[in-house]
Image (spheres, coloured by chain):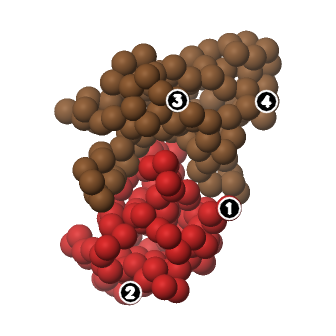
Chain colours: A brown, B red
């Protein structure tokens, strides 16, 4: 049981390049989330997918797109990277059992945009 | 807008001390509250989850409490050890199951 996995672990892009961050979970969770973590700002929600086939914007969605490929996989795409998108990106999935909700996080992708 | 605040931003204590980390939230209609630990350059490790109907949760030397009426949660660490040094994050669950995070308390436990 690997939990939540993310690829790549590190990435350096030039302004204007595109890339996709991959996330997969093997815990059969319905909901998945993408957050970014910046110094002094804490973690902020970019997009989320409450269930397979649905996606919604979070607090900071501009410049990103997402795809919920299947129940296991939720990808985040930067179409035209900007230096302001330099950040650490975390994917999470949620164990939802009635009133019990716990989120589990992947190890993160450290992205630098030059 | 829901906000989560953690005080202090940084804390340094000698090994063996008991300590309390504080978290306050603005939305009293809280669903769940989750405490995490983050080591430098690493991901988030879930420590404790307190459901909205609960008042506290315990795991080993950790105890987290929740007081919805005052909008506060505390994380109590007993007999601190150098290995407890990390950043501790508090997060309130939003209506869509997402988490709203505080900015964390950076803890340093000195031998």
Q: Where, by quadrant of the figure, is residue A12 drawn?
A: top right
- Whole-percent x, y for residue B32 in the image: 40, 64
The local secondary structure at tag 4 comes to: helix
Q: Chain of mark 3?
A: A
| Same chain shared by disc 1 and disc 4 | no
Task: Chain letter for mark 1, please.
Answer: B
Q: Is residue A108 visible?
A: no
Same chain under badges 2 and 1? The reply is yes
Between disc 2 and disc 3, the foreground one is 3
What's the distance in space between the residues labelled 3 and 1, CA to CA? 21 Å
**Other residues around mark 1 within 10 Å, as few (<14) / some (14–19) / many (≥20):** few
* Residue to which mark 4 is pinned: A83
Alpha-carbon distance for marks 3 and 4? Answer: 25 Å
| Disc number placed over residue B1 in the picture, else none | 1
Residue at point 73% right, 26% down?
A63
Mark 3 and mark 1 residues within 8 Å of each other at the beta carbon:
no
Q: Earlier in the sequence, mark 3 or mark 4?
A: 3
Instruction: Tell me whether circle 3 and circle 4 mark residues in contact (CB < 8 Å).
Output: no
Quick check: marks 2 and 1 in contact, CB under 8 Å? no
Say few, some or many: other residues with alpha carbon within 10 Å of mark 3 (under 14 / 14 to 19 / 20 or more).
some
Which quadrant of the figure contains the C terminus of chain A?
top right
Same chain? Circles 3 and 1? no
Q: CA distance from mark 1 to mark 4?
A: 27 Å
Frontmost of labels 3 and 4 is 3
Residue A100 lies left or right of residue A111; in this view the side is: left
Can residue A16 be seen? yes
Asked which secondary structure carries label 2, the reply is: loop
On the image, the x and y values in percent for residue A8 come to 49, 22
The disc label shown at residue A55, or none:
3
Residue sitting nearer the eye, B99 or B43: B99
Are the residues flagged by discs 4 and 2 in contact, CB closer than 8 Å?
A: no
Q: Are marks 2 and 3 on the same chain?
A: no
């Amino acid at each position: 049981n690997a939990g939540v996995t993310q690829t790549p672990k590190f990435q350096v892009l030039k302004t204007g390049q595109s890339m996709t961050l991959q996330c997969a979970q093997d815990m059969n969770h319905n909901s998945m989330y993408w957050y970014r973590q910046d110094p002094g700002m804490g973690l902020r929600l970019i997009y989320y997918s409450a269930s397979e086939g649905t996606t919604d914007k979070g607090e900071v969605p501009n410049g990103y797109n997402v795809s919920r490929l299947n129940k296991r996989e939720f990808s985040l795409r930067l179409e035209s990277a900007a230096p302001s998108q330099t950040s650490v990106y975390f994917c999470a999935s949620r164990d939802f059992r009635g009133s019990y909700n716990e989120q589990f996080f992947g190890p993160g992708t450290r992205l630098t945009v030059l | 807008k829901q906000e989560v605040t953690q005080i202090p931003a940084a804390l340094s204590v000698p090994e063996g001390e008991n300590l309390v980390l504080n978290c306050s939230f603005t939305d009293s209609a809280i669903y769940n509250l989750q405490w995490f630990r983050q080591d430098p350059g690493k991901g988030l490790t879930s420590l404790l989850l307190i459901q909205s109907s609960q008042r506290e949760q315990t795991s080993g030397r950790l105890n987290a409490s929740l007081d919805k009426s005052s909008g506060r949660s505390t994380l109590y660490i007993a007999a601190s050890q150098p290995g407890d040094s990390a950043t501790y994050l508090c997060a309130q669950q939003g209506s869509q199951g997402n988490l709203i995070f505080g900015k964390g308390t950076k803890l340093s436990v000195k031998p």
